[in-house]
Image (cartoon, rainbow, N blue to C red):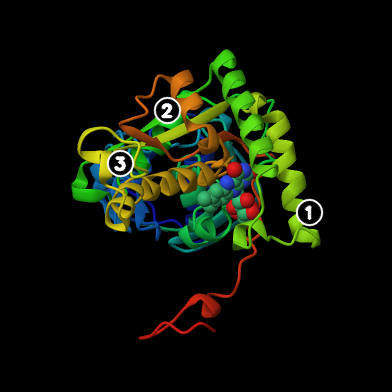
Amino acid sequence: MVTALLGDQVSDRNKSAVEQFFVAGREVDRLSFMTEDIEWWNGLGKFPAAPGQTVFRGKDEVGARILGRAPSPPQPNGRRIDRYDLSTISFDDVHTIADGPYVFRQHLYKATTIGGKPYENVYGFLFRFTDDGLIDRIWEHWGTLNAYETLFQGPLVVHDPDEILMTTPSVRQRLDLERSVDRDVIAECMEIAVHAPNGSNQQPYRFIFVDDAETKAKLAAIYRSAMADFIGRPRTDAAEDRVDRTSEAQQRIARSVAYLAENIEKVPVLCVPIVAGRTDGNGSGAHADRTSTFWQAGRWGSVVPALWSFMLALRSRGLGSAWTTLTLIREREVAEVLGIPYDEWMQVGLFPIAHTIGTDFRITPRKPAEELTRWNQFRSS
Ligand SMILES: Cc1cc2nc3c(=O)[nH]c(=O)nc-3n(C[C@H](O)[C@H](O)[C@H](O)COP(=O)(O)O)c2cc1C
């Protein structure tokens, strides 16, 4: 005969079950604390294995999805999903309240992810117990944004697309020259970049990455010679020849440009993106006289969107680059170093790539959009 438990005894039994649920080692099956028709609400709605789902029902689903016993399906963006390493977990600041069939427990959960990142989050769990002492309902309240960004978003340092678009500067002095760049991260950013729009979806571009010291040194020498050519050019009344260099902002840019020129061969990776077909009259075959705006816009427009996507993907992963075009003054020399058929391919520039020193960047200073926007008619002011 089962003796009915008194109120306090019920609370104590349920409270100790909750304690066991969290602290028991892996030899204890957490599913054994639950009824067959357990319901677990976790409010996230962005579980990689169950997008849009916030309630998980039955032991099979809870085991596979929440307790993570089934592998996550591959993500559409190819990003790897991290998760915490169960052997590293600890609980701090634990508060437990038991009242009849309900137990509420809040704690600070600390763990290291399998990818090596520290994870810390506050969780509040409300458990409901049956008369038999099994859990039939769990409401899990937790810092969902923190969990999502740390566990499920891969190695991104910026998640908000607007922030990435507004804080991607030309990085020169904050390029980390000491830290190497893994080819995998370049490959990942390229996977993203190739989805940019381009003419007739022919993707008539290639990105040549250089991490070989000797080749980088040759490109650096060309960059510095081209810079000397540019500084020594005859001046005209064109706007680009009349930049006022006296302001503090312009002097800062000048210092930064000089720093890059001095250190460019030390940057871990240099990239030369190229597009098929010349529009400067130096091309061969059909491209020899395709110099109109129509052809120019089509060629540049078939590489620049992918390049900017690539730079934004670098930024969201904690790397940076700078758009530089000086080497185009000596484009033939670069073509020779890299074996690019000059008559058939135009270079976009030279892009230094490195991890950035720190990942916080201010909003890039620009004119207000209103000044650059017109409706219906061009007006000069
Ligand atoms: C078409 C183009 C050409 C550029 N060429 C160079 C260059 O040859 N060397 C360099 O150090 N920076 C170059 N820059 C970077 C600009 O100087 C930089 O974007 C600008 O000063 C604004 O700085 P921010 O992007 O960091 O806000 C170039 C940028 C563009 C878009």
Mark 3 or 1 closer to N-term?
3
Q: Nearer the viewer, residue 335 or 126?
A: 335
Q: Is residue 166 above or below residue 116?
A: below
Determine whether label 3 and label 1 are within 8 Å by CB.
no
Cβ at disc 2 under 8 Å from ligand 1: no
**Disc 1 versus disc 2: nearer the observer:** 1
Q: Residue furthest top?
A: 214
Measured as percent of width and height from the top left, residue 100 is found at: 47, 64
SS of the residue at dot 1?
Answer: helix
- Residue 125 is labelled as none
Residue 232 shows in this picture: yes
Can you identify the residue that label 1 sits on? 251
Residue 319 shows in this picture: no
Q: Nearer the viewer, residue 146 or 132?
A: 146
Q: Is residue 280 above or below residue 240?
A: above
Determine whether label 1 and label 2 are within 8 Å by CB.
no
SS of the residue at dot 3?
Answer: loop
Can you identify the residue that label 2 sits on? 208
Mark 3 or 2 closer to N-term?
3
Q: Is residue 363 above or below residue 367?
A: above
Quadrant in the picture for residue 362: bottom right
